[in-house]
Image (cartoon, helix red, strand yellow):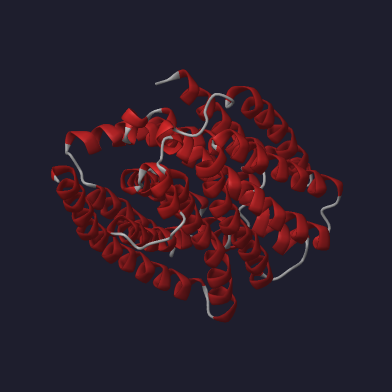
Amino acid sequence: MPKKLWFLLIGMILNVTGNSFLWPFNTVYIHIYLGKSLSVAGLILMFNSLAGVFGNMLGGWLFDKFGGYRSILTGISITFLSILGLVINHSWAYYSFFFVILGFGVGIVFPSMYAMVGAAWPEGGRKAFNAIYVAQNLGVAIGTALGGVVAAANINYIFSANLLLYIIFFLVALFGFRDIGVPNEIKETSQVEKAEKQKFSFTPSMKALMIVCCAYVLCWLVYVQWQTTIASEMQNLHIGLTKYSQLWTVNGLLIVIAQPVISTAIRKYDLSMRKQMLFGIGFFIVSTIFVSTAEQFSMFMTGMIILTIGEMFVWPAVPTIANMLAPKDRIGMYQGIVNSAATVGRMLGPVIGGALVDTFNMRVLFIILVVFLLISMVFSVLYERLAKKVVKAENQTFAS
């Protein structure tokens, strides 16, 4: 791998480690420590994610316009200020405000990171996105393991720990990302192409991206229940925060250890992106059904392991698809759309999940989650049909 990609991997580890001190405990903190209902907690998480959608789109635009260096530093600066605000005051009103700003800042960072991966190692293909995915989950493993210890001692310390990691991340980005700028393909875009770039047109590649994003939204909507309703249910079953954080530690470590095995299997059996998505969603379904009857920690852990196997198929596939579909001058835009789709799933998940549990019960929630996953399988099949049209159109253009 190129040297500059290693800086991106280190940056991603620091970024996610810092975030992992906070995100697993958001619902628990709002619901238990601040005394708000699950519906209210879901609403705040929704606003956080909505701000993230705007951040995603802005981050993608900034990458295409100015390059990853400036866009990432902008996102880190906003995130740093919001976390500093949480350290100073995390009572209900201040927590709500700074948490939403935090979503916007984090949203700017992620699409730029993924777009920079494609630019830093264009010949890497799936390997580049698998590498950044493994780095991301190494950060999850480290952050949740340490976060559980910190939260068990005093949950208020998680804000300070997050702040410290972001200071280090800022320094790594400031000195390590400087030479990773706008790709040459973007710099050399003709004036005509620049004019066309301003138009948001539904080309075959954009349609294919939108279809796969629909599946991505539904998958994230299900996945985020582990951070919201399932987290709260574990507390109701008197399973402590330390054990809950262990789920995410195992999640991150399993990905770091097993992702190379999964990647090798995908290459060996030459799985298409559609099959890769369908395999992963299938594991999501099995995990959801299994956890629907869980009452002991061991059952939740088993469900998490099954879920993790599924995400190792799905999560790296979607940004790879975006990179494959994106015109050279719209890499940031396409990654911004993909990250926005994930953020929409994270936004709707807590609201829908919290409302269903408050209105009905956990059993009804799990039934609906399985239905969502089945629908996402349909979208995955439709995506491949559109993607084939994209390849056919590109071949015709090349031949002409």
Residue name at image x 52 percent, y 48 percent:
60
Residue name at image x 58 percent, y 52 percent:
58
Residue name at image x 20 percent, y 43 percent:
271
Residue found at the far right of this picture = 88
Q: Can residue 331 be seen in this view?
A: yes
> How many numbered badges does the structure rendering display?
0
**In which image quadrant can residue 376 be found?**
bottom left
Residue found at the far bottom of this picture = 359
- The image shows residue 303 at horizontal and vertical percentages of 42, 52
Q: Is residue 228 above or below residue 136?
A: below
- The image shows residue 177 at horizontal and vertical percentages of 57, 27
Left or right, 85 with reference to 230: right
Residue name at image x 59 percent, y 58 percent:
54
Left or right, 256 with reference to 274: right
Q: Which of 206 and 295 is in front in this view?
A: 206
Residue found at the far front of this picture = 191
- The image shows residue 80 at horizontal and vertical percentages of 73, 41
Q: Is residue 37 above or below residue 268?
A: below
Q: Nearer the viewer, residue 318 or 292?
A: 318
- The image shows residue 394 at horizontal and vertical percentages of 21, 48
**In which image quadrant can residue 256 be found?**
top left
Q: Can residue 148 be seen in this view?
A: no
